Image (spheres, grey):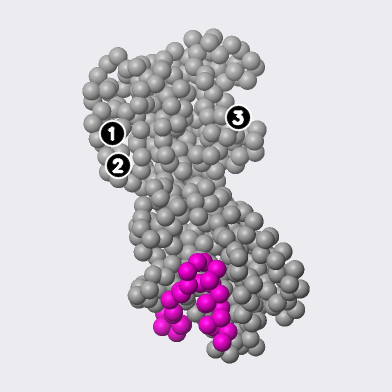
Amino acid sequence: MKRAVIVFTRVPIPGQTKTRMMPYLTARQCACLHRCFLKDIKNACENVQADLFICYTPEGKEGILSSLFGENVVYFPQEGEGLGERMHYAINKVLQNGYQACVLIGTDVPEIWSEHLLNAFGMLDGNDVVFGPTMDGGYYLVGMKKPCREVFEKQTYGHGNVLDQTIGRLREKQLKVCCIEKLYDMDTREDLQGYRERMRQNLKLQKTETGKYLMRTSRISVIIPVYNEEKTIVQVQEQLRHYQSQCEILFVDGGSADRTLELIDPGFRVIRSKKGRASQMNAGAQESHGDVLFFLHCDSELPERFLAQIRYVMKDYRAGCFGIAFHSRNFFMWTCRVISNRRVKDRKVMFGDQGIFIDRELFFEVGMFPELPIMEDYQFSLTLKEKGIKLGIAKQRIYTSDRRFPKGVIPKLQVMWKMNRLRKMYRDGTAIDEIARLYRDVR
């Protein structure tokens, strides 16, 4: 049987494609994403014994598509007034060239595999029309053996009943109709977030052009709560200055009474909040726009390429942190480092000085950080653990200040013992104000 696949697409030109994803993505990013869709669809088509046709709009931009699909395919522009008329024109044009079966696919479904196309051709052996449904009620694929204008007549698109209405009308005309697997289309920011979540469950998606692009371009918001940090605020800005164009950076001040605010460069955004690390981090999260929220302590020292490391962890996990380290060579500080890093893997608990990062939707889903004067990070970890959220840990370490640990072996041991005791008191239900009093703010 002589078969054909029609890829029905816009040319990936900035500002003319995937515009519903703007301003979340820039016009250029929308075009790059669409190119990734096309590359993945091309890979699916290459494993199917069928001739490939590219039906495109706008006319005159064939060269952009030929750079993606090559010269061994047929290109022709879309013709017709509405979407239905243009699809009918494309199918009719191909079938008139002697093909016994034709499948037309859109390009908003990068999760289409060769198996879907083969299944569609197989279904046409005993049916007049085959559809590939989308989760929103439309369809990403339509196939037939001879031109069937009834598929596209009296049809409006862009609503959730497109496919049901089409199938009902065809069956009234005694046509045999069937459907293959339902897939997700990709039109909005929420659709991209859903794809990222499916990537964590399906490693095959991580290897696609779309998957790799989304991993590289996930937006990260760095949220730094500050309070009387004039000794550390300049250093943390120097670390972040190089990344200002690569992520969103928010300083959240809790009412500093020293020179913290005047030392923050005007190029950084500052939010004011009531004092309390939980309140400040929550305020920053609510003002942020990132897909991933990264909560950073002001006295931390970031590893190189920290954004790439966060993205690498987040391709498999919805939450995670860095391993922790201290510049001190003291044996007990080394012990503290080992225990803290093992705690993430063994007990599924991470603390704020490890640099917590989390999927934006998950952060708000679990209710943000609890408004506690202390132990907000500990309780946050316990909440994630209760919900069965697995934690990832970056390979590189984040260095944190040991300013809470006094000099001398015995004083260090006393602080470590005290911190364990306070966590035990919290688990046992001791009043949080009493725990906060015993903790004592060092600033």
Residue 326: image x %, image y %?
Answer: 39, 32
Q: Is residue 76 magenta?
A: yes
Q: Is residue 8 above or below residue 280?
A: below
Whether label 2 touches label 1, CB < 8 Å: yes
| Horizontal relation, residue 280 to residue 431: left or right | left
Label 3 and label 1: CA atoms lie apart by 32 Å
Residue shown at 64%/35% (left/top)? 387
Disc 3 designates what residue?
A: 382
Classify mark 2: residues with Cα within 10 Å, few (<14), some (14-19) or many (20+).
few
Q: Give the image quarter of residue 32.
A: bottom left
Assign a secondary structure to mark 2.
Answer: loop
Confirm whether residue 329 shows in the render: no
Give the label on residue 287, or none.
none
* Of residues 339 and 45, the one drawn nearer to the viewer in this rendering: 45
Assign a secondary structure to mark 1.
Answer: loop
Disc 1 designates what residue?
A: 268
Q: Is residue 287 magenta?
A: no
Q: Amino acid at mark 1?
A: Phe
Give the label on residue 244, or none.
2
Mark 1 or mark 2, which is nearer the start of the sequence? Answer: 2
Q: Is residue 146 above or below residue 22?
A: below
Q: Quadrant of the C terminus?
A: top left
Residue 21: image x %, image y %?
Answer: 44, 51
Assign a secondary structure to mark 3.
Answer: helix
User: How many discs appear?
Assistant: 3
Classify mark 1: residues with Cα within 10 Å, few (<14), some (14-19) or many (20+).
some
* Of residues 400 and 233, the one drawn nearer to the viewer in this rendering: 233
